[in-house]
Structure formats: C-alpha cells, structure tokens
Amino acid sequence: MGSKSLDYILLTVVIIGAINWGLIGFFRFDLVAFLFGNMTWLSRIVYALVGIGGLYLLSVYGRIRSIEQA
C-alpha cells in the first residue's frame, strides 16, 4: 500500500472523527458510542485510530511544504 493510499484512508478516518466531534459539540450525540457502546473495547479502538490518524496527518504539512518549494 502506497503512501497516497494510506493518506486517503487516514484522512477518511479523521473526517469521520471530526464529524463525530461536531455531533458531540452541537447535539451532545456521540455517534461512536451509539454504534459501538460507551467506551467498549471497539469504541476505544475507533477513538485510537482517529487519534493516530490525526497524528500521522501532521506529516502532510511537511509534504505540502516540500511540494510548494519544488
């Protein structure tokens, strides 16, 4: 799997996480907890994947900067 594929997969996961945070902020509705249970092992995995995806996507800033300089 190439870096570009990983970027798109993790971007999708982080967007889902952002939508979940928006639902929590506006409506106090936690979609992940609704689907997988409140802090079950499965919901914790989803939260962890969103967090790891966000950390990984920090590297996108460096790649964008190197593309702009080229």
Image (tube, grey):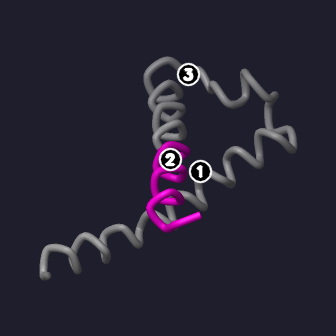
Whether the residues at callouts 1 and 2 have beta carbons within 8 Å, the answer is yes
With respect to residue 17, does 8 lie above or below? below
In the image: residue 6, left or right of residue 61: right
Magenta region includes residue 52: no
Q: Residue furthest front?
A: 1
| Figure quadrant of the C terminus | bottom left
| The disc label shown at residue 50, or none | 1
> Of marks 1 and 2, which one's residue comes earlier in the chain?
2
- Residue bearing mark 2: 14
User: Toward which corner of the image does residue 1 lie, by quadrant?
Assistant: bottom right
- Residue bearing mark 3: 28
Relative depth, front residue between 28 and 15: 15
Magenta region: 1-14
User: Toward which corner of the image does residue 66 lie, by quadrant?
Assistant: bottom left
Whether the residues at callouts 1 and 3 have beta carbons within 8 Å, the answer is no
With respect to residue 29, does 63 lie above or below? below
Provide the secondary structure element on which disc 2 rests: helix
Q: CA distance from mark 1 to mark 3?
A: 19 Å
